[in-house]
Image: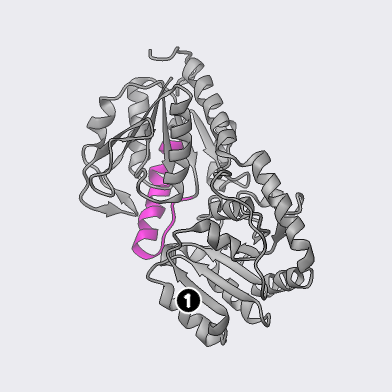
């Protein structure tokens, strides 16, 4: 089957969406499908083939709302032949071009909706216009809409009949459980430290840490907001218990150095899934997070961690204090976390779901509902 991925960027560029596309595309290619990616050439000079996946990388000049504007995108898509096109939101422009190409080819369009396009200031005004004027057209043109989070955005409510939920996955061979470290309870947090990612809730976590004596916090990630968070820690009087690690090259060692991992996400419009939770769980670490992340429905029923309300540092502090007081239970919680990942959140299982969806649509459905056969 010929599958065309239309995505803004692709590895070696590092990012959550890029990571998910890479794993599914690579596994589909290994299963014998012809997978081709059209994306921007960032970083410049990236390879034209990545582990059996052919990649068309287009030159670009500037970005709009974190999307590389590639003026040759439409011409590049018109040259492609495919049985199904797969594209992604929240990044703009590429999804519209993918929808137009699918219509021109008369083939199905699968749209993975990671989270709402959103922003602050001028970017917020632009994304607001996009959400009202352009996004509905892309959703209407999509044959199926994949959500990574069962608690999908209200934006998708009118398209309920098109929705399919497929979560993200994690590399269980890469992320390996480790023995708990010694010393005081240490909480891990990992994210880009910039204005766009403030919804990850680090400010809330710092306030919670300030309420609990002795508990330590390790923060992985770099960005222009790092000093802003460091100043917050100083104002709270916890700078001696908070460690800013910057870029973390060895994620296994990072998760192994923590007793529990926290992701207190605050904005359901922007938090699509929370992949770092799966990484921590694969390493055998309990998690503490909020009900808006993609795995929230499994956290407490499967006994792998705790859910707390968003933007509530007191509730977060209470939950962390309970974990500290019941520290002997953490290894068992971590083992259940690893087992859950192996059962439900491997990239093999995610690829199974996408392969099933692509194959079904490629055989039978086009956007206007007419029946076709692949390659027609």
* Residue depicted at 72% across the width and 69% down the height: 319
Q: Is residue 146 magenta?
A: no
Horizontal side of 56 relative to 221 (left or right) equals left
| Residue drawn where x is 62% and y is 50% of the image | 282
In the rendered image, residue 16, in percent from the top left (x then y), is placed at: 46, 49
Main SS of the magenta part reads: helix
Q: Which residue is drawn at 64% across and 49% down?
A: 295
Number of numbered labels in the structure image? 1
- Quadrant assignment, res 316: bottom right
Q: What stretch is highlighted in magenta?
A: 116-139
Q: Is residue 136 visible?
A: no
* Residue 180: percent from left, percent from top: 67, 63
- Depth order, front residue of 30/227: 30
Q: Residues within 10 Å of mark 1 (few under 14, many from 20)?
A: some
Tell me the quarter of the picture where residue 214 sits.
Answer: bottom right
Tag 1 residue: 229
Find numbered disc 1 in the image and state the secondary structure of the residue it sits on: helix
On screen, residue 375 versus residue 308, left or right, reads left
Eyeballing the image, is 214 above or below 103?
Answer: below
Q: Nearer the viewer, residue 307 or 322?
A: 322
Examine the image and state in which quarter residue 181 appears.
bottom right
Query: Is residue 123 inside the magenta stretch?
Result: yes
**Of residues 276 and 125, the one drawn nearer to the viewer in this rendering:** 276
The quarter of the picture where the C terminus appears is top left
């Amino acid at each position: 089957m010929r599958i065309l991925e239309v995505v803004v960027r692709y590895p070696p560029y590092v990012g959550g969406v890029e990571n998910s596309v890479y794993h599914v595309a690579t596994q589909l290619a290994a299963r014998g499908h012809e997978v081709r990616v059209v994306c921007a050439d960032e970083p410049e000079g990236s390879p034209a083939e990545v582990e059996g996946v052919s990649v068309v990388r287009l030159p670009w000049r500037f970005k709009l709302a974190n999307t590389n504007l590639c003026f040759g995108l439409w011409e590049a898509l018109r040259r492609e032949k495919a049985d199904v096109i797969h594209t992604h939101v929240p990044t703009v422009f590429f999804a519209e071009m993918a929808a137009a190409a699918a219509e021109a080819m008369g083939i199905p369009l699968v749209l993975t909706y990671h989270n709402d396009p959103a922003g602050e200031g001028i970017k917020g005004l632009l994304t607001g216009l996009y959400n009202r004027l352009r996004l509905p057209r892309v959703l209407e043109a999509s044959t199926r809409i994949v959500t990574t989070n069962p608690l999908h955005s209200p934006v998708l409510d009118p398209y309920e009949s098109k929705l399919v939920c497929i979560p993200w996955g994690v590399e269980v061979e890469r992320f390996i459980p480790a023995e708990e470290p010694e010393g005081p309870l240490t909480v891990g947090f990992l994210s880009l430290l910039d204005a766009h990612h403030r919804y990850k809730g680090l400010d809330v976590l710092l306030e919670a840490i300030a309420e609990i004596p002795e508990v330590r916090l390790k923060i992985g990630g770099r960005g222009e907001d790092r000093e802003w968070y460091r100043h917050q820690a100083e104002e709270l009087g916890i700078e001696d218990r908070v460690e800013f690690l910057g870029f973390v090259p060895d994620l296994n060692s990072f998760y192994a150095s923590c007793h529990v991992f926290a992701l207190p996400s605050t904005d359901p419009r922007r938090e699509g899934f929370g992949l770092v939770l799966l990484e921590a769980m694969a390493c055998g670490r309990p998690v503490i997070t909020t009900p808006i992340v993609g795995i929230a429905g499994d956290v407490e029923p499967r006994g792998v961690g705790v859910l707390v309300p968003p933007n509530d540092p007191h509730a977060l502090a209470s939950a962390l204090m309970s974990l500290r007081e019941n520290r002997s239970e953490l290894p068992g919680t971590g083992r259940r976390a690893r087992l859950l990942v192996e059962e439900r959140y491997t990239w093999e299982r995610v690829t199974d779901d996408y392969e099933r969806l692509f194959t079904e649509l490629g055989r039978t459905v086009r956007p206007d509902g007419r029946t076709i056969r692949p390659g027609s």
